[in-house]
Image (tube, rainbow, N blue to C red):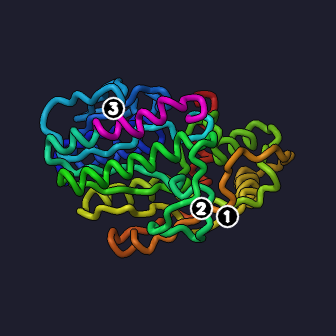
């Protein structure tokens, strides 16, 4: 494992866990984040050879010293955030990815792109394999995130082919755990907050749509396994256990030991109805698969939110 890692979006949910793990490995870590969706509180506990640079990677990436690893996670990642920051989301996916790739190329560093299962859109293939090209509405409200990541993948692959940059692409499926923002609009923090505060739980449509939920520690394991390899990807990182949203609500209520009213709300435009990864490539190429069971991951998440809800 190299000596100096740069993590863009390192003050975000997944990024902060990644910074923490890299530090535990003994690396020097530079976290770059403009705090548009990330939180300074997420990295306040990180010390030692940890450096925070408040900057927008779409405007440039000025890093001091040699860099061995670039992990590019910078981007709004929840529908509420990227619909609030549509142009910024496209810019960080396009221009920001270019700056991160330039940094990796200039240093001969390994580059890992945190892409997303959203590149598959509302999939017609199930489960989704990396060979599936997706079913994406290019002008819908979700397109700013979907197309930003699809372009970021294309640029990453082009830099590998044309410039010899050592790149890897990870497609991250729904990830959850401590340090998610309660107001980011994603399912688990929304449901957990509602259950813990006794509010009605709001479920889109009939709640029959499915997600495959991966605990953040497992997702970080996958990103590190990809960073440690020379595999170009793309590779799915997610939990192949598929769960209906209404069943997820029931499990959260069971673990919280409470029961609150469940209220249906209109489903968002282009909301995927099924989402489940085929992880055969990750198992074969990276020796990776998720290990944290859903009930344990939800238990840890509930415990963290119960302590931090007033802060998030």
Secondary structure, mark 1, is strand
**Residue 36, horizontal then vertical, whole percent:** 48, 26
Using the numbered discs, state the Cα–Cα distance from disc 3 to disc 1 in whole angstroms: 34 Å
- Mark before the other along the chain sequence, 2 or 1: 2
Residue 258 magenta-highlighted: no
Using the numbered discs, state the Cα–Cα distance from disc 3 to disc 2 in whole angstroms: 29 Å
* Quarter of the rendering occupied by the N terminus: bottom left
Q: Main secondary structure of the magenta part?
A: helix
Residue 308 in view (yes/no) = no
- Mark before the other along the chain sequence, 3 or 1: 3
In front here: 167 or 51? Answer: 167
Q: Are marks 2 and 1 in contact (CB under 8 Å)?
A: yes
- Mark before the other along the chain sequence, 3 or 2: 3
Secondary structure, mark 3, is strand
Residue that label 3 marks: 32
> Is 169 placed left or right of 141 in the picture?
left
* Quarter of the rendering occupied by the C terminus: top right
**Residue 289, horizontal then vertical, whole percent:** 44, 68
- At a point 22% along the width and 51% down the height, the residue shown is 110
**Residue 8, horizontal then vertical, whole percent:** 34, 37
- At a point 58% along the width and 65% down the height, the residue shown is 276
Secondary structure, mark 2, is strand
Residue 108 in view (yes/no) = yes
User: Height in image: 29 above or below 132?
Assistant: above
- Residue 6 is tagged as none
Q: Specify few, some or many for label 1: CA neighbours under 10 Å numbering under 14, 14-19, or 20 or more.
A: some
Residue that label 1 marks: 243
In front here: 229 or 115? Answer: 115
Residue that label 2 marks: 212
In front here: 26 or 99? Answer: 99
What stretch of residues is rendered in magenta? 82-99
Q: Which image quarter: residue 174? A: bottom right
């Amino acid at each position: 494992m190299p000596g100096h890692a740069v993590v863009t979006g390192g003050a975000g949910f997944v990024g902060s866990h990644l910074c923490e793990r890299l530090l535990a490995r003994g690396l020097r870590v530079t976290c770059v984040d403009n705090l548009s969706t990330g939180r300074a509180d997420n990295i306040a506990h990180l010390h030692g050879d940890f450096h925070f640079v408040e900057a927008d990677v779409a405007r440039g990436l000025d890093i001091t010293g040699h860099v061995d690893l670039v992990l590019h996670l910078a981007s709004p990642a929840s529908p509420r955030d990227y619909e609030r920051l549509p142009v910024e989301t496209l810019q960080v996916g396009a221009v920001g990815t270019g700056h991160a790739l330039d940094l990796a190329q200039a240093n001969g560093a390994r580059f890992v792109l945190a892409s997303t299962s959203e590149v598959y859109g509302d999939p017609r293939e199930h489960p989704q394999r990396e060979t599936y090209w997706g079913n994406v509405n290019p002008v819908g409200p979700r397109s700013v995130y979907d197309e930003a990541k699809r372009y970021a993948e294309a640029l990453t692959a082009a830099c590998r082919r044309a410039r010899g940059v050592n790149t890897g692409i990870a497609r991250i499926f729904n990830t959850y755990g401590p340090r998610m923002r309660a107001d980011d609009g994603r399912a688990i923090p929304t449901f957990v907050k509602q259950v813990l505060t006794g509010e009605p739980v709001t479920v889109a449509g009939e709640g029959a749509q499915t997600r495959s939920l991966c605990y953040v520690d497992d997702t970080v394991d996958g990103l590190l396994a990809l960073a440690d390899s020379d595999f170009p990807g793309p590779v799915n990182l997610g939990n192949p256990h598929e769960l209906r949203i209404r069943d997820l609500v029931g499990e959260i209520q069971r673990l919280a030991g409470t029961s609150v009213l469940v209220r249906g709300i209109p489903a968002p435009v282009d909301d995927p109805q099924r989402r489940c990864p085929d992880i055969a490539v990750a198992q074969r190429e990276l020796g990776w698969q998720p290990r944290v069971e859903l009930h344990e991951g939800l238990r840890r998440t509930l415990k963290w939110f119960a302590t931090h809800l007033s802060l998030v």
